Image (spheres, helix red, strand yellow):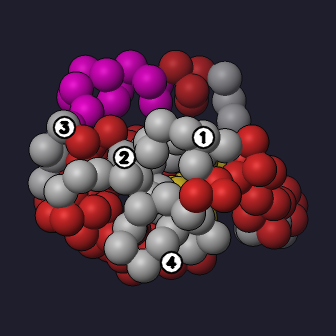
């Protein structure tokens, strides 16, 4: 679970830069530390509400696969992924599908070698996902 003061400090620092958009990416640390689905979604809601208050568009990346030893942790990652997709819809970035095995672990071709982090090839795919989301175009057509 994110430190509540840390959430506000990080988002406040980002908003002081007067961004056109904010992308939130919290791939797996919360699950690794035992944070529940509800707590994770509350954290996302707190951050997105703060960004919304500043009238800045926000996109939320799904969780990413992780080679957790416990099946329950892999299931939680998938539950958070699904909840992000439902809650944020067109403003959710799919950082899961290209990289995940059916059991929630990282496909070997995208594993950096530690079972937790994606490699350079995966980051190229992540960049393409962000490009295909057409964030600049969305900002330009914003009312």
Q: Identify the residue under disc 3.
A: 33
Q: How crowded is mark 3: few (under 14 residues within 10 Å), some or many (20 or more)?
A: few
**Local secondary structure at mark 3:** loop
| Residue span colored magenta | 1-12
Name the residue located 77 percent from the left edge and 50 percent from the top edge. Answer: 121
Foreground pick, 72 / 139: 72
Single out the mark in the foreground, 4 or 3: 3
Single out the mark in the foreground, 1 or 2: 1
Q: How crowded is mark 4: few (under 14 residues within 10 Å), some or many (20 or more)?
A: few
Q: In which quarter of the image is residue 132?
A: bottom right
Residue 22: percent from the left, percent from the top?
61, 44
What is the spatial separation of the Cα atoms under label 4 and label 3, in whole angstroms? 26 Å
Q: Is residue 8 left or right of residue 137?
A: left
Q: Identify the residue under disc 1.
A: 112
Q: Does the magenta stretch include residue 130?
A: no
Q: How crowded is mark 2: few (under 14 residues within 10 Å), some or many (20 or more)?
A: many
* Earlier sequence position, callout 4 versus callout 2: 2
Q: Identify the residue under disc 4.
A: 89
Task: Look at the picture and state if 102 lies above or below 113.
Answer: below
* Earlier sequence position, callout 4 versus callout 1: 4
Q: In this view, does 53 lie to the left or right of 3?
A: right
What is the spatial separation of the Cα atoms under label 4 and label 2, in whole angstroms? 20 Å
Q: In this view, does 94 lie to the left or right of 12?
A: right
Name the residue located 56 percent from the left edge and 29 percent from the top edge. Answer: 15
Residue 18: percent from the left, percent from the top?
68, 30
Single out the mark in the foreground, 4 or 2: 2
* Earlier sequence position, callout 2 versus callout 3: 2
Q: Quadrant of residue 16?
A: top right
* Earlier sequence position, callout 1 versus callout 2: 2
| Prevailing secondary structure class for the magenta stretch in the rendered image | helix
* Earlier sequence position, callout 3 versus callout 1: 3
């Amino acid at each position: 679970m994110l430190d509540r003061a840390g959430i506000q400090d990080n988002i406040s620092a980002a908003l002081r830069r007067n961004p056109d958009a904010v992308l939130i990416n919290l791939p797996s640390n919360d699950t690794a530390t035992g944070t529940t689905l509800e707590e994770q979604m509350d954290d996302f809601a707190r951050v997105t509400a703060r960004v919304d208050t500043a009238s800045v568009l926000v996109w939320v990346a799904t969780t990413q696969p992780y080679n957790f030893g416990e099946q329950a942790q892999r299931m939680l990652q998938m539950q958070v992924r699904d909840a992000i997709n439902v809650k944020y819809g067109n403003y959710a970035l799919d950082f899961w599908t290209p990289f995940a095995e059916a059991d929630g672990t990282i496909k070997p071709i995208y594993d950096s070698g530690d079972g937790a982090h994606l490699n350079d090839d995966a980051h190229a795919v992540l960049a393409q996902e962000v490009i295909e989301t057409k964030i600049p175009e969305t900002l330009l057509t914003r009312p």
